[in-house]
Image (tube, grey):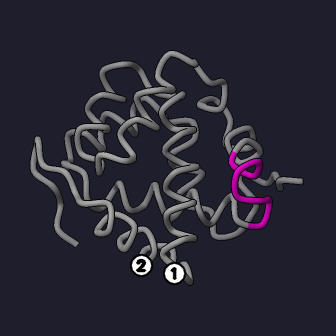
Amino acid sequence: MTRLENGEALSLAAFVTAVQDVGALTTPEEADRAASSTLWLVGGCLSWSAAENLAGHLPKPLRRLVRDRVFDSSMCRFAPQAFLQRMAEGVGASRAAPDTRAVLRTLDLILPEILTAQLHAELKSIWGPLTIAEDSQVSGLSIS
């Protein structure tokens, strides 16, 4: 997978394929649902500038998900468990952690390094735990 340059964006098909590959998701529909749900939540966790930077590298259909949530100031940014609980509302409890992990890891692989550093800094309390965990448990907490 090639890292994007500043100002470069992936097509929707390429992004969904990347999420599907990174997350070992069975279908493109699962990957699309994972991407949409995760990016919608991430958008509410970011500052306006970080959301704009991220949106600029996303496929057009996914940009709005990030931009529309930027002023929601989601409390999910402070706790991996809260993020996964909100994620479960969109994809189900069994898919929340693996889908989130697939999308965040994909962003780590494709975004310019300066942007990934910005995202990691803004979401430091959740990015690591949500990308490292290998099951539905994050920092010893399971979603229910």
Q: Residue furthest front?
A: 61
Question: Spatial distance from mark 1 to mark 2, Cα to Cα?
Answer: 5 Å
At x 43%, y 35%, the residue is 66
Q: Residue furthest right?
A: 144
Specify few, some or many for label 2: CA neighbours under 10 Å numbering under 14, 14-19, or 20 or more. Answer: some
Element marked by disc 1: loop
72 left or right of 108 in image: right
At x 37%, y 47%, the residue is 61
Do the residues under discs 1 and 2 have CB atoms within 8 angstroms? yes
x and y percentages locating residue 25 in the rendered image: 54, 78
Q: Is residue 15 magenta?
A: no
What range of the chain is rendered magenta? 87-94
Task: Examine the rendered structure and indicate whether residue 49 appears above or below residue 14.
Answer: above
Q: Is residue 92 magenta?
A: yes
Task: Tell me which secondary structure the magenta stretch mostly adopts.
Answer: helix
In which quadrant of the rendered view does residue 18 lie? bottom left
The residue indicated by pointer 2 is: 21
The residue indicated by pointer 1 is: 24
Element marked by disc 2: helix
Report the quarter where the C terminus lies: bottom right
| Amino acid on which the number 1 mark rests in the picture | Ala
At x 52%, y 49%, the residue is 128
